Image (cartoon, grey):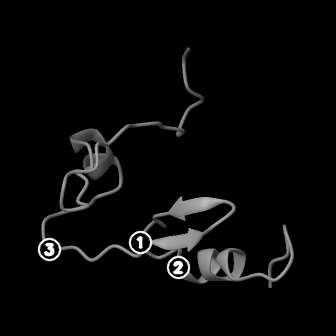
Amino acid sequence: MQAPKGKYAWTATVGEKGQIVIPKQAREVFDIHPGDTLLLLGDEERGIAIPNKGSFEEFFAVAFSEKEGETK
């Protein structure tokens, strides 16, 4: 199956220490380098998100909204 342009899917294995390796292609696409700090957002019902650099404000609004689909 061909993914739509700009959409990606990768897998990562969680190691014994809870660490994951971000696949090389994902690091290249999202300009992630050693020493970068990533923000992980979690919702017990919707899962974990790693927002794009510079998109934090939008993701905070979505992640912390009270109602499904509510944004500020």
In the rendered image, the quadrant that contains the N terminus is top right
Q: What is the CA distance from the residue labelled 3 to the residue labelled 1?
A: 14 Å
Label 3 packing within 10 angstroms: few (<14), some (14-19), many (20+) = few
The residue drawn where x is 46% and y is 76% is 54
Residue 3 position (above or below residue 27):
above
In the rendered image, the quadrant that contains the C terminus is bottom right
In the picture provided, is 72 more to the left or to the right than 40?
right
Q: What is the CA distance from the residue labelled 1 to the residue labelled 2?
A: 7 Å
Name the amino acid, label 3.
Gly
Q: Quadrant of residue 20?
A: bottom left
Name the amino acid, label 2.
Phe
The residue singled out by tag 2 in the image is 56
In the current view of this chain or complex, which residue is farthest to the left?
Answer: 34
Image depth: mark 3 or mark 1 in front: 3
Q: What is the CA distance from the residue labelled 2 to the residue labelled 3?
A: 18 Å
Label 2 packing within 10 angstroms: few (<14), some (14-19), many (20+) = some
Q: Which tag, 3 or 1, sits closer to the chain's start?
A: 3
Q: Give coordinates of residue 24: x percent, y percent.
A: 21, 42
Q: Give coordinates of residue 17: x percent, y percent.
A: 18, 62
Circle number at residue 53: 1
